[in-house]
Amino acid sequence: VQLQASGGGLVQAGGSLRLSCAASGRTFSMGWFRQAPGKEREFVSAVSYSGGSTYYADSVKGRFTISRYNAKNTVYLQMNSLKPEDTAVYYCAADRYGVGSREPDEYDYWGQGTQVTVSN
């Protein structure tokens, strides 16, 4: 499975972006993680294969929404009310066996990352 993340960019604080993650094959449970310079990769959000279960980090709850469209093997992350502290490289990942883990080690496939920069 190959994952291609896109949709990042530069936005002002309070703005919105929508990230997409397209998979070359079947998608499994999917997650979004992010990594800011000098920091460890952190969990952002995850969704089960059916889309029936979603999970969010406390820092993004109420602002970000994860969704998926299995017919197109694509997962989305709608990010609203963006803050400068959301600035990071965002990665999508696929988990073959789980239902949406918060642990990066549980994921089997990773995309290349897309940069999100939020300015003041």
Image: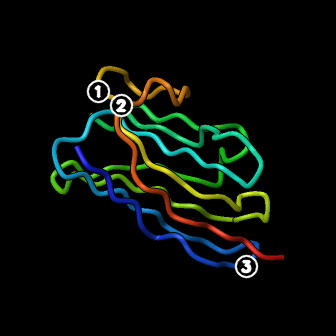
Going by the numbered disc 1, the residue's amino acid type is: Arg
Residue depicted at x 46% and y 35%: 54
Earlier sequence position, callout 3 versus callout 1: 3
Residue 90 locus on image (x, y percent): 55, 55
| Residue ranking furthest to the right | 120
How busy is the neighbourhood of tag 2: few (under 14 within 10 Å), some, or many (20 plus)? few
Element type at marker 2?
Answer: loop
Residue 10 locus on image (x, y percent): 64, 78
Question: Is 54 placed left or right of 86 in the picture?
Answer: left
Residue 6 locus on image (x, y percent): 42, 67
Q: Are marks 2 and 1 in contact (CB under 8 Å)?
A: yes
Going by the numbered disc 2, the residue's amino acid type is: Asp
Q: Looking at the picture, does residue 66 appear above or below residue 50? A: below
Between the C-alphas of marks 3 and 1, the distance is 36 Å
Q: Which residue is mark 1?
A: 96
Q: Which residue is mark 2?
A: 108
Element type at marker 3?
Answer: strand
Examine the image and state in which quarter residue 117 appears: bottom right
Going by the numbered disc 3, the residue's amino acid type is: Gln
Q: Are marks 2 and 3 in contact (CB under 8 Å)?
A: no
Between the C-alphas of marks 2 and 3, the distance is 33 Å
Q: Looking at the picture, does residue 92 appear above or below residue 109? A: below
Q: Which residue is mark 3?
A: 12
How busy is the neighbourhood of tag 1: few (under 14 within 10 Å), some, or many (20 plus)? some
Question: Is 5 placed left or right of 22 in the picture?
Answer: right
Look at the image and tell me in which quarter the C terminus lies: bottom right
Q: Looking at the picture, does residue 118 appear above or below residue 38? A: below
Element type at marker 1?
Answer: loop
